[in-house]
């Protein structure tokens, strides 16, 4: 099930890009069906210049409730299936390990591109 760390995030969810909503429900459904666990959203809007979070097209989800293998399975399923734009970037950034100086802890960063069209590969 898709859950939210705070009530404010649940309110913000109404404003995010519709494609991101569908994507987050898909990931939550995958996690629920495969592992019987929840996908917990920890960040949606963030006023960081150059970040997709600033444009309501980015979301962060907790990974602390998933095993390493479960997390790997999610990334392996979503990235080849949900194509970000021309495929030049990833739909899920796997940030379970530190990847950037501003890293805030283990999570998945999920994003959709600014184009009208998004693609499913199968
Ligand atoms: Zn993020």
Image (spheres, rainbow, N blue to C red):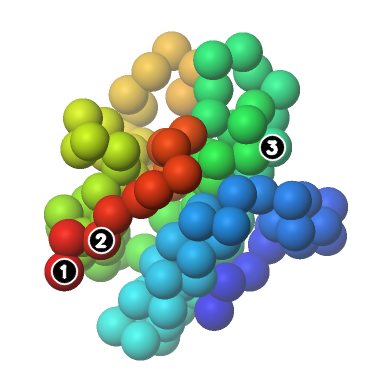
Give the percent coordinates (x, y) of residue 98. 35, 27
Please tell me whether mark 1 sits on a helix, a strand or a loop.
loop
Q: Is residue 69 visible?
A: no
Residue 120 numbered mark, or none: 2
Q: Nearer the viewer, residue 26 or 109?
A: 26
- The Cα–Cα distance between marks 1 and 3, rounded to whole angstroms, is 30 Å
Residue under label 1: 122
Is residue 74 shown above or below 58?
below
* Residue labelled 3 has its Cβ within 8 Å of some atom of ligand 1: no
Tell us which disc is closer to us: 1 or 3.
1
Q: Is 102 positioned to the left or the right of 71 in the image?
A: right
Is residue 14 shown above or below 111?
below
Q: Is residue 5 visible?
A: yes
Asked whether the residues under the numbered discs 1 and 2 touch, taking CB atoms below 8 Å apart as contact, a structural biologist would say yes
Can you say which quadrant of the picture contains the C terminus? Answer: bottom left
Q: Is 56 positioned to the left or the right of 50 in the image?
A: right
Q: Residue at x 64, y 18 (%)?
A: 48
Residue under label 3: 45
- The Cα–Cα distance between marks 1 and 2, rounded to whole angstroms, is 6 Å
Can you say which quadrant of the picture contains the N terminus? Answer: bottom right
Number of residue marks: 3
Q: Residue at x 71, y 22 (%)?
A: 47
Q: Which residue is drawn at 43% across and 37% down?
A: 115
Determine the image quadrant of residue 10: bottom right
Asked whether the residues under the numbered discs 1 and 3 touch, taking CB atoms below 8 Å apart as contact, a structural biologist would say no
Give the percent coordinates (x, y) of residue 37. 45, 78
Q: Nearer the viewer, residue 52 or 114?
A: 114
């Amino acid at each position: 099930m898709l859950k939210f760390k705070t009530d404010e995030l649940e309110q913000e969810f109404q404003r995010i890009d519709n494609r991101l909503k569908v994507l987050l429900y898909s990931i939550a459904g995958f996690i629920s069906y495969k592992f019987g666990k929840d996908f917990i959203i920890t960040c949606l809007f963030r006023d960081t210049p150059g970040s997709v979070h600033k444009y309501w097209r980015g979301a962060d989800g907790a990974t602390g409730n998933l095993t390493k293998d479960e997390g790997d399975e999610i990334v392996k399923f979503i990235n080849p299936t949900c194509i970000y734009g021309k495929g030049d970037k990833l739909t899920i950034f796997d940030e379970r390990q530190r990847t950037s100086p501003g890293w805030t802890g283990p999570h998945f960063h999920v994003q959709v591109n600014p184009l009208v069209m998004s693609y499913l590969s199968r």
